[in-house]
Image: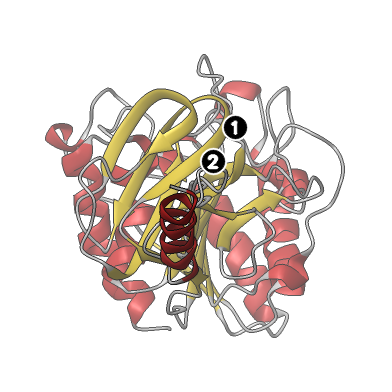
Amino acid sequence: MRFARWLVSAVLMAMVAVGALAPVSAAASPVAAAEALPTDPNIRFTGRWDTTNSAAYTPYWAGAYLTVGFTGTTVRLQQRGTIDLYASVDGGPTVSYTGVSGVVNLTPQPLASGNHTLVVSYRVVAGSYHGDAVFQGLTLDAGARTFAAPRRERLIEFVGDSITVGTTSSRNHLTAYPWLIGEQLGADHTAIAQGGACLVAADCVGLEQQFTRLNPNAPTPDWDFARYRADAVVINLGTNDVGHGVSGAQFQTSYTNLLRTVRQKYPNAWIFALGTFRGRYLTETRAAVSTVTAGGDGRVSFVDTAGWLSSSDLSDSVHPNDQGHRTITGRLAPIIAARL
């Protein structure tokens, strides 16, 4: 009997040694998912993002987005609070996520194993919408990793008001002409734009001053222009200044100042000064362009937009609808492409 018990014990120990039987006390632990913090160098942030908090990055202005490559079969966002966002995986259709927070599963149907890309943009936080556009990282499969997605060679910056933001279009900035033009031309794109913005600071956000800021609604801090360089800048301002009593002379001076500021920040960019679609301050805009070109800046153009939009292109008397933004894209994209 003793020999039988000894034999059973010896056999069990041998099975443990070769891995055929695990000891009861050594239960397998689940493998932790991979985490990618906002500081991950493979995550590229396009636009003006506040990165002072390494655990939570916040985009300001319209149209900011992040791009990253990742391996594995799933990807989840880590969001601080409730937000509306848009995400595209592997260049596929952009999916809307409304009122999501915490861990946001972007791949409810797992992907094929391999390399993938992700682009995420947040709904513009402005007006009556106050979502929490704070990115806190990614969660990937256990053992998965991030990698740097291919970088686009050019960047176009769009400066403007609610028309540039895409207010009243179906997907806000994602259906606005800056996003459409950037994607059509294969360029990265930023939008230094906010609904209600003016050129002159006259009881509204004045982009003559705020163009250089990290946050459109704060006087400081300044944006670090070393973080990216625009190859082209498109300015569409003047629609709202009329309602704030800005004189033609004041508008022309401020527009000239803005053109000079843009040139200082982006020495090699081509600057396009659009005539407003409603025809406001056209003489003053042309004159500002003439002033800087006469001063030796040969990389500034006035773009006459008269007749571009019809009533069917507008959702109201001011804002283009989806068709209108496509119309602007069809007109403006070739003009920009010719100078890039």
Q: Which residue is mark 1?
A: 241
Q: Are discs 1 and 2 less than 8 Å apart at CB?
A: yes
Question: In this image, 217 relative to 328: left or right?
Answer: right
Give the CA distance from mark 1 to mark 2.
5 Å
The quadrant holding residue 321 is: top left
Circle number at residue 238: 2
The residue closer to the viewer here, 213 or 298, is 213
> What amino acid is found at the position of numbered circle 1 in the picture?
Asp
Q: Position of residue 16 (x, y in %)?
A: 47, 62
Helix, strand or loop at label 2? It is loop
Using the rendered view, name the quadrant where residue 317 is placed: top left
Task: Mark yes or no: residue 319 visible.
Answer: no
The quadrant in which residue 47 appears is: bottom right
Q: Residue at x 58, y 26 (%)?
A: 132
Position of residue 52 measured from the top left corner of the image (x, y, whole percent): 82, 49
Write the residue at 43% across / 83% down.
340
Q: Is residue 97 left or right of residue 5?
A: left
* Amino acid type of the residue tagged 2 in the rendering: Gly
Instruction: Return the residue nearer the eye: 44 or 114.
Output: 114
Q: Residues within 10 Å of mark 1 (few under 14, many from 20)?
A: many
Place of residue 145 in the rendered image (x, y in percent of width and height, measured from the top left): 49, 67
Q: Residue 76: image x %, image y %?
A: 43, 44
Which of the two residues, 228 or 307, is positioned nearer the viewer here? 228
